Image (cartoon, helix red, strand yellow):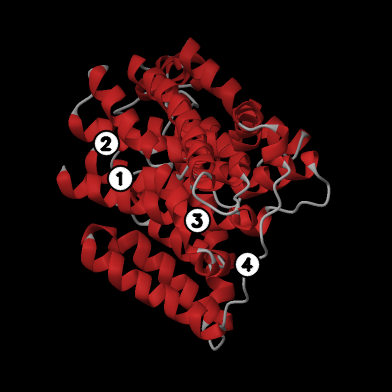
Amino acid sequence: MESIARFIDSSGFANATPGHIFMILVGLLFIYAAIRYEYQPLLLVPIGFGILIGNIPFLEHTGLRLGVYEEGSVMNYLFMGVLKGIFPPLIFLGIGAMTDFSTLISNPKLILIGVAAQLCVFLTYLGALSLGFTNPESASISIIGTANGPTAIYLASKLAPHILGSIAIAAYCYMALVPLIQPLIMRLLTTKKERLIRMKLPRAVSQREKVLFPIVAFLLTGFIIPASLPLLGMLFFGNVLKESMVTKRLADTARNTITDIITILLGLTVGASTQATTFLTEGSILIFILGTLSLVIATAGGILFAKMMNLFLSQENKINPLIGAAALAAIPDSANAVQLEGIKADPDNHLLMHAMAPNVAGVIATAITAAIMMSLM
């Protein structure tokens, strides 16, 4: 009877708290949204099921080593890819192998829009400091608003691993919410006339330019800010694999097999890190609020900067300010949101190719900003 009592006491039913139940419901909501509405399934299904894994209640410190935070557990070993900053560079490798920098090369002034969106990082940093977060915590939180999950995770793993779970969940939630939040801001900050602007087609970019760009960009960013090497080194390496035309198998592996495997492991372990006993805190709520405000500021900053650029451009070189919203590092979700909004205004006005320029510029700028933060801290 004593053994039976111990077994019952160690069950999930005996150790469940309202926090565990709440987080399980959140995980089920993620999975439901992904399956029922096909809403960002590649993100929400792994994260949602990870939340379920992380919130099955168990007696901690029993030697069974079950939880993601218990040293020696299987989930803890998988989570090391997040804690040690291994998964984010591999994600960047896949992004590089998928990305076409042609529009950015042909119209380099659009880089400025990606840089302008980084305003949200510094404003969020100051906001986090004012709410009582430490310097390293504030720096880690500040990246969330760019909707760049891998960069946010990488910076948090180096500066503030104790709040990594909250930052990772917030960053990936905002990546998933981009198609819902950004259109509202785009319509609010642009006029009908501005949304109808048709941009000049980008010039054709030679294969030599496509190969030289990632090499030159890597050398420049590497020498300016060496702390960016893990992320931008992998990003530009993946792009060289794609554009060199002689490593097609490696490029396919990077953008498909490796990216899929890392997405599964990253989503699952990030979800599992949301154990109610460590995740549901006042700090986590503040992180989500700061992230939401940061996302709005980043989107608005890109749009308003594009409108400002138009003041100095000739009529034929005008920029459709909608593409400013693509300055977020959520690639290609932000660019797709711009494309859909542009089509609503004019079914024949396709902005995707133009939006990809500030989109990839945002990825690069966010990685550089995170590297600067890491170097300063």
In the image, residue 377 sits, relative to residue 27, either above or below, namely: below
Which x, y percent locates residue 182?
60, 34
Query: Mark 3 sits on what residue?
Result: 110
The residue sitting at 52% across, 32% down in the picture is 51
> Neighbour class for label 4 at 10 Å: few (<14), some, many (≥20)?
some
Find out whether the residues at labels 4 and 3 contact each other: C-beta distance under 8 Å: no
**Closer to the observer: label 1 or label 4?**
4
First in sequence: mark 2 vs mark 3? 3
Label 3 element class: helix
Q: Which residue is mark 1?
A: 155
Q: Secondary structure at mark 2?
A: helix
At label 4, which amino acid type do we have? Pro
- Residue at which label 4 appears: 202
Earlier-in-chain disc, 3 versus 1: 3
Q: Nearer the viewer, mark 1 or mark 2?
A: 2
Q: Nearer the viewer, mark 2 or mark 4?
A: 4
